[in-house]
Amino acid sequence: MQSDEAKKAREELLAKWKSRRYQEGAEIKQETPRARRRIIFLALAFVLVATFVGLLQIGLAPIVGVVIGGIALFVAGIWELFVINKEPWSRVLLYILIPFYSLYYTFTRWDKMKKPFIVGLVGAVILVAGIVPAFTQYKGELEDVFVEFMEAAAIKDIDAAYACCSPLQDRGEVADFIDYNYDCFAGYEAVTTSSWEVASSNGVTQGYIGGAIIYSGEQRLPFEAWLVKEQGVWKLIGISVSY
């Protein structure tokens, strides 16, 4: 009798052990794909960051950042709509029409909304990282041309000053402009930029820059300058200094 009970106890113990091993194996199998997905995600993130840094070195990161960021935001938006489309239409309309309801919906249903939200967040970061350098890049390019012209005009280097101007300008006119308005160039020290703008129309890219010219003795005069991009190079087409 005791032998039968001992045998039954051993069988129950063995069955529990097998069941536990099976459950542990199932958990391992479930965790393995998740671990692989995490590794793949981290690898892709590393490749994207490395690619972005490399493109930044050659000046293409702003354009690529805007494109990739815009695509990511678009994909995230469509993804979110697919998820919320399973809800009643009243909730869908609230999500689309009511400001900030989308955030409320996202955080109250985080399990199913976290993936598109993270994709959209990453896209927004990449987009901003592309727009900011592109925006400030134009400022630097426009300012460099104007500064080069001011430095040349200050020492009456007509050839260097004319090199900053559009070929549509006559060299003699540039020389006369500098001579006649030399008070605007004498004592030049630096430039501070407060506004700039770039626009393209009919295949022509034009730029505007405004700010103040700093002279020796801390004197400041406001200025405006207009430029045009010719064969990839900014050239001056007009300058206005108020004094």
Image (cartoon, rainbow, N blue to C red):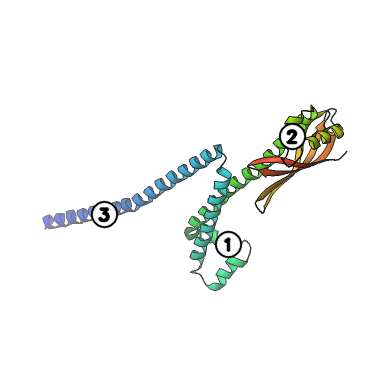
Is the C-beta separation of discs 2 and 1 under 8 Å? no
Q: Is residue 242 above or below residue 22?
A: above
Numbered disc 3: secondary structure = helix
Could you tell me which residue is drawn at 53 percent across and 50 percent down?
A: 68
- 1 or 3: mark nearer the eye: 1
What residue would you read off at disc 3?
A: 22
Amino acid type, callout 3: Tyr
Determine crowd level at label 3: few under 14, some 14-19, many 20+ residues with C-alpha closer than 10 A. Answer: few
Could you tell me which residue is drawn at 75 percent across and 33 percent down?
A: 161
Determine crowd level at label 1: few under 14, some 14-19, many 20+ residues with C-alpha closer than 10 A. Answer: some
Could you tell me which residue is drawn at 18 percent across and 55 percent down?
A: 9
Query: How far apart, in angstroms, are the residues tagged by discs 2 and 1?
Result: 56 Å
- Say the numbered circle drawn on residue 102: 1
Residue 152 in sight: yes
Quadrant of the rendering where the C terminus is positioned: top right
Amino acid type, callout 2: Tyr
Query: How far apart, in angstroms, are the residues tagged by discs 1 and 3?
Result: 42 Å
